Amino acid sequence: MRAVVWEGKPYEMVVRSVPKARIEMPEDAVVRVTTAAICGSDLHTYHGLLGSREPGWVMGHEAIGVVVEVGPATETFKVGDRVIIACIPDPGHLVAKPEPLPGMYSLYGFGKDFGGLEGCQAEYVRVPFADDSLVKIPNNPSKDLDYLFLSDIFATGWQCVDFSGFRAGDTVAVFGAGPVGLLAAYSAILRGASKVYVIDHVRSRLDKASSIGAIPIDFTAYGKGGAAAQILELEPEGVKRVCDCIGYECLNVDLELQEDYVITEAVNMAAIGGGIGIVGVYMTVPVSKGAPRADLISPTITFPIATFFSKNLSIRGGIADVLGRDPTLLQLVSSGRAKPGFIVSSEVDIEEAPEAYRRFDEKLEQKVVIRFPWERKESSLVVRRPRTARSVA
């Protein structure tokens, strides 16, 4: 089968043939992928910062598809079911004592040290503990781009709002107008935020934020003093909730890497008694062949503890419980109330994935999805185009 593979070379992805996914355990299923996506977390690997020690794994953890094979112990799903592949499969046992990654979770598309599951940017995927790891969806390809993001980023954006302690009527500021940040802002709007500010510096992303009803903030705007200064000018008492959807690859006003920039600005702009949610990645690994530039990221950052303490703030973050959020989000998408597919800017063939990674990394794309040949026949939603990654915007 054809798959996108990380070989340990920063800023390079390759597409090549790898062994086809197969049933390995009685509880498994094999899913034929119809649509996959490139995630911002994939870019940490693309930059050589995050992954297992030994390279050579299939990338990706966002996908939907059709079940084509089930193990003898799989009872809930059958061949032909259309499903979401949740980015973190169920562990298959009760986790009574939480452990830090790697170990607590298996993740698709990050190599052997993260559970060893091959990724979803491939024609087929093996899903362990399928009865608890898959989410069934209607056989309605016209909604695929909405259901797709329940595999990760819609649930992640939603949980970032949860982490912040959000209540209806709160003011919210979201750092990052990438896919997760936009869906965090979208989630806050759906849930009744009084105002939502989205902070970024890329004009196309800020325009997308504006299109969903958020207030765009260019934190690099000349003479305006950065993110917190601009927010406090508009909200003198601060915003009640702040969402960090960027993580350790954040940039300061000079567009230079500064790992503590978002955290510091978030504390400064938060209102007394407010909360901060974090889903931007702050996970580090040792330098290795699979993460050759990992030493560019520190496992510790400075934190404005005095301001945080004096404001009575709360902070919470981590990896989203995607399967736990999906029942709610499934109802929102099925009813038509939520349409997270608005973030997609391009649809490409798998052979175009290396170029799509480059364009996404350079912020020339808002969100890229990979359509497979059979899906192009099944779905009238697909925009057919020459074999180049072009925007549909």
Image (cartoon, grey):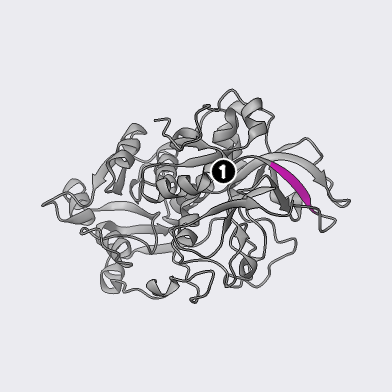
- Residue drawn at x 66%, y 66% as measured from the top left: 115
Specify whether residue 214 is in view. no
Which amino acid is tagged 1?
Glu
The quadrant where residue 142 appears? top right
In the orientation shown, which residue stands out farthest toward the left? 223
Please determine whether, in this image, residue 91 is positioned above or below residue 156: below
Q: Which residues are magenta?
A: 28-32
Please provide percent x and percent y for residue 329.
57, 40
Instruction: Please tell me how many numbered marks the rendered image carries.
Output: 1
Please provide percent x and percent y for residue 202.
29, 45
Specify whether residue 51 is in view. yes
* Image position of 186 (left or right of 125): left
Residue 127 magenta-highlighted: no
Q: Nearer the viewer, residue 9 or 251?
A: 9
- Residue drawn at x 70%, y 51% as measured from the top left: 133
Residue hosting label 1: 351
* Image position of 11 (left or right of 52): left
